[in-house]
């Protein structure tokens, strides 16, 4: 249930940062050939910080924006990055108003029916969170039999707990705010949920440095997806190959880790 993480160190950083290995060094995609695109028009949103947002100058910024620019530099091609409303991204891609969506679009059966994806460049694990001064928990089913675990109702995280942590006491909450309030009130021992959202919540000054992760990431694809890639039209194989080559190149020289460190000071793996 729990996958191992592998160390990766970003240039100029001290301690190792642990990230899952997403690319197989023995199965490297071929370098782009003469038929590779000379320009890429990325589509994104502008209201999902720190992935995509407008900075104080009104310019696009964020993890996905920097990633798109790094891909363009790696491929040595000209690029544009155009913001759209979140609910208009797929329509804009199908209308050929852009070539690829870089907006943390998660793969679902409905979305896969309309687009294809590159290899994932980050995963969306689940994790446990405790109060910062809480004891160390053995975050395995047998270690949490006496624990009370909070989770948001009705989603994959609740379903996962009911399957694998059925001997724990599971309390469901209507939203993350209610769950984290219960953790801070000590009416639950642990909260369980999307590690990306929880890391961003803990990094917010309003959290008061109350909490920390316990245990490692849970990455089961059947519950938490196969990761986030760049979406493109299903027939655009040439662009997909170019993007996959660029993503693996960026990963191998540590550029993806540098972006991760820049935007996620509390890592979610």
Image (cartoon, rainbow, N blue to C red):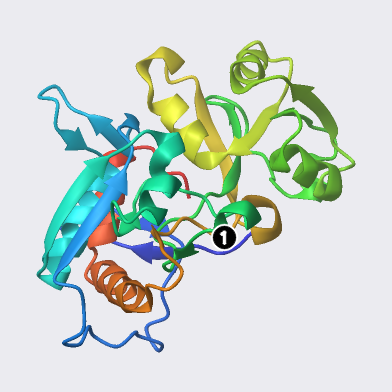
Which residue position is annotated with label 1?
112
Q: Quadrant of the N terminus?
A: bottom right
Say whether residue 254 is left or right of residue 213. Answer: left
Q: On the image, which quarter does residue 204 sit in?
A: top left
Q: Secondary structure at mark 1?
A: helix
Q: Note whether residue 258 is visible.
A: no
Q: Position of residue 146 (x, y in %)?
A: 84, 34
Residue at (30% x, 37% y) in the render: 52
Q: On the image, which quarter does residue 82 sit in?
A: top left
Q: Is residue 190 above or below residue 162?
A: above
Residue at the limit of the structure toward the top, as seen here: 185
Crowd tier of the residue under label 1, counting other residues whose Cα lies within 10 Å: few below 14, some 14–19, many 20 or above:
few
Along the viewing direction, whichever of 167 and 193 lies nearer the viewer: 193
Residue at (37% x, 72% y) in the render: 236
Q: On the image, which quarter does residue 109 sit in?
A: bottom right
Q: Is residue 266 above or below residue 209?
A: below
Along the viewing direction, whichever of 67 and 231 lies nearer the viewer: 231
Q: Position of residue 96 (x, y in %)?
A: 32, 56
Say whether residue 123 is left or right of residue 63. Answer: right
Q: Position of residue 186 (x, y in %)?
A: 68, 15
Residue at the limit of the structure toward the right, as seen here: 167
Q: How many marks?
A: 1
Q: Note whether residue 88 is visible.
A: yes
Residue at (27% x, 31% y) in the render: 53
Q: Position of residue 189 (x, y in %)?
A: 71, 26
Say whether residue 92 is left or right of residue 62. Answer: right
């Amino acid at each position: 249930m729990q996958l191992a993480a592998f160390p990766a160190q970003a240039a100029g950083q001290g301690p190792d940062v642990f990230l899952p290995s997403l690319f197989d060094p023995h199965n490297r995609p071929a370098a782009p050939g003469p038929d590779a695109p000379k320009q890429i028009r990325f589509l994104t949103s502008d209201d999902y910080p720190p992935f995509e947002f407008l900075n104080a100058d009104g310019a696009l910024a964020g993890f996905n924006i920097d990633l798109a620019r790094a891909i363009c530099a790696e491929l040595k091609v000209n690029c544009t990055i155009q913001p759209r409303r979140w609910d208009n991204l797929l329509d804009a891609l199908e209308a050929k108003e852009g070539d690829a969506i870089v907006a943390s679009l998660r793969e679902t059966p409905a979305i896969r029916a309309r687009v294809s994806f590159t290899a994932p460049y980050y995963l969306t694990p689940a994790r446990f969170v405790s109060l910062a001064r809480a004891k160390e928990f053995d975050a395995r089913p047998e270690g949490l039999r006496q624990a009370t675990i909070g989770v948001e109702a009705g989603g994959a995280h609740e379903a996962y707990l009911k399957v694998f942590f059925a001997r724990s006491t599971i309390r469901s909450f209507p939203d993350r705010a209610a769950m984290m309030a219960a953790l801070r009130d000590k009416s639950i021992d642990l909260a369980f949920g999307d590690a990306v959202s929880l890391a961003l919540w803990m990094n917010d000054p309003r959290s008061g440095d109350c909490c920390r992760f316990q245990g490692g990431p849970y990455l089961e694809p059947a519950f938490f997806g196969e990761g986030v890639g760049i979406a493109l039209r299903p027939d655009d194989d040439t662009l997909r190959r170019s993007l996959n080559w660029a993503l693996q190149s960026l990963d191998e020289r540590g550029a993806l880790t540098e972006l991760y460190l820049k935007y996620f000071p509390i890592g979610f793996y």
